[in-house]
Amino acid sequence: MTNFLISVGSIIVVLGVMILVHEWGHFIVARLCGVRVEVFSIGMGPRVWGFHRGTTDYRISALPIGGYVRMAGENPAEERAGAPDEFLSKKRWQRALIILAGPTMNIVMALAIATAMMMSGKAEPTYLRHQPGVSAVAENTPAAQAGLRAGDLLLKVNGKAVRTWDDALWQSMFVTPGSPLAVVVERGEKQVSLEIMTSASDSASDLLGYPVQETVVGLVKEGMPAAKGGLQQGDRVVSVAGKPATSSYVVSMAIAGSDGKPVPMVVERDGQTVDLTLHPTYGELEGTKRWYIGAVFETPIRYRTDRVSSAVRDGVRYNVMITAQIVNTIFKLVEHKAHLKQLSGPVGIAEASGQAAREGLLAFLNIMAIISLNLGILNLLPIPILDGWHLLTLGVEGTIRRDLSLAVKERAMQVGVVFLLLLILIVTYNDVLKIVAPTR
């Protein structure tokens, strides 16, 4: 019950703050553009308390789930006076700025939180500061097709010298999808140049392979092959199936490719090596059926503190990388290369927020930054009812030099509402399944 209450409280705080910041962006730019704002509400539903200042009713509403801004003359379906301070009386570029301000504030807030985290001390994967050695390359990825191999050391990415995985990942962000990514690797005593073809749906591992890192067991599920075989939390996997365990991906793929046969594993525990034999089970894992053992491998992390200039730079980098992951997921969904099970709805967000709250302030701030960035980017999608659709509509109207008919706009909004409701229902259903019937 305590965890449930923490999760509920966490999602109210996270979504409340994120939506409030979003609406404040609309509000402040609307005021700067001379639009009369009738209501600025914290929360939804009936008015509980508030005060009037000028023409605006600042209120707290009954339902603590974000907030909203209501501008004069905002709804084309309602009767308008045609006053100059109405939203629809403003020029299209002014309306576009007002609409864009909401997502922009979410993105700015994500950057501000990330920068603050860097200054106060941030947990990051240790491999980011290590040499960019490649532990494995997944089959049928652009990297594999270009000839990148396990054991390669990245020297240049996108024409720039790289010394760490952080450098390599950052440089890979600047290649235009559809064009080749130039990579130079050290292979044995030779340097090999590769051209890796890219697309919008490629992940970092699709282009650069998986980093070399220690493989440490973070969680062992009771009753699963890992637990039955003697694997314990905190074990460091040294080798699997007779090969060095240079990353968790290498371990996972060795198990997935076992075809159910026993998998020998050597682990380091309390300074000593222990030989184990695991018997994988077959089932659905992360949306695909494969052999697995019921263990989660953690990514070793370290804490670092930055100066202001470094914190801003690393905050930008962090947000660019998260943005790339979000955009990558969207493209994979469109191309049917990813499943809706990978998305999280209100239940999943509540669970993640609650877990972060229990881990501490930094973890909670991190989840807030990620959700704020997601909210800002997803709101820019051209889906009816979202800000991106309104921006697209303004662009179309500006091009054809006339407003679209009210009937067209209403029908689009109806389609958008139905689509989003169905999407929320599907991802919520999947979130509940993950809790009541986990696959790992």
Image (spheres, rainbow, N blue to C red):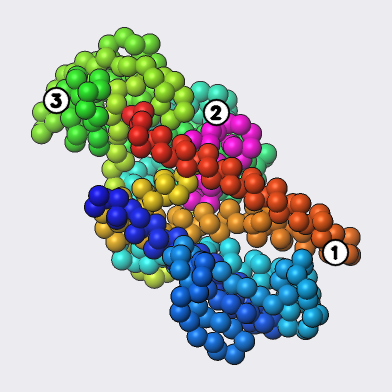
Q: Quadrant of the C terminus?
A: top left
- The percent coordinates of residue 216 (x first, y second) are 25, 35
Q: Earlier in the sequence, mark 1 or mark 3?
A: 3
The quadrant where residue 36 appears: bottom right
Separation of residues labelled 2 and 1 (CA atoms): 45 Å
C-alpha gap between disc 1 and disc 3: 72 Å
Magenta residues, start to end: 320-341
Viewer-proximal residue, 230 or 289? 289
SS class of the residue under badge 3?
Answer: strand
Q: Position of residue 264 (x, y in %)?
A: 24, 15
Mark 2 highlights which residue?
141
**Of circles 2 and 1, which is in front?**
1
Does label 2 or label 1 sit earlier along the sequence?
2
Q: Position of residue 345 (x, y in %)?
A: 47, 46
Mark identifier at residue 403: 1
Mark 3 crowdedness (10 Å alpha carbons): few <14, some 14-19, many ≥20: some
Q: Quadrant of residue 391?
A: bottom right
| CA gap, disc 2 and disc 3 | 35 Å
**Residue drawn at the location 68% of the way across and 71% of the way down:** 97
Q: Give the SS element for disc 1.
A: loop
Residue 36 makes an appearance in the image: yes
Q: Amino acid at mark 3?
A: Thr
Q: Is 68 on the left or on the right of 403, as rendered?
A: left
Q: In the rendering, which numbered label is found on residue 273?
A: 3
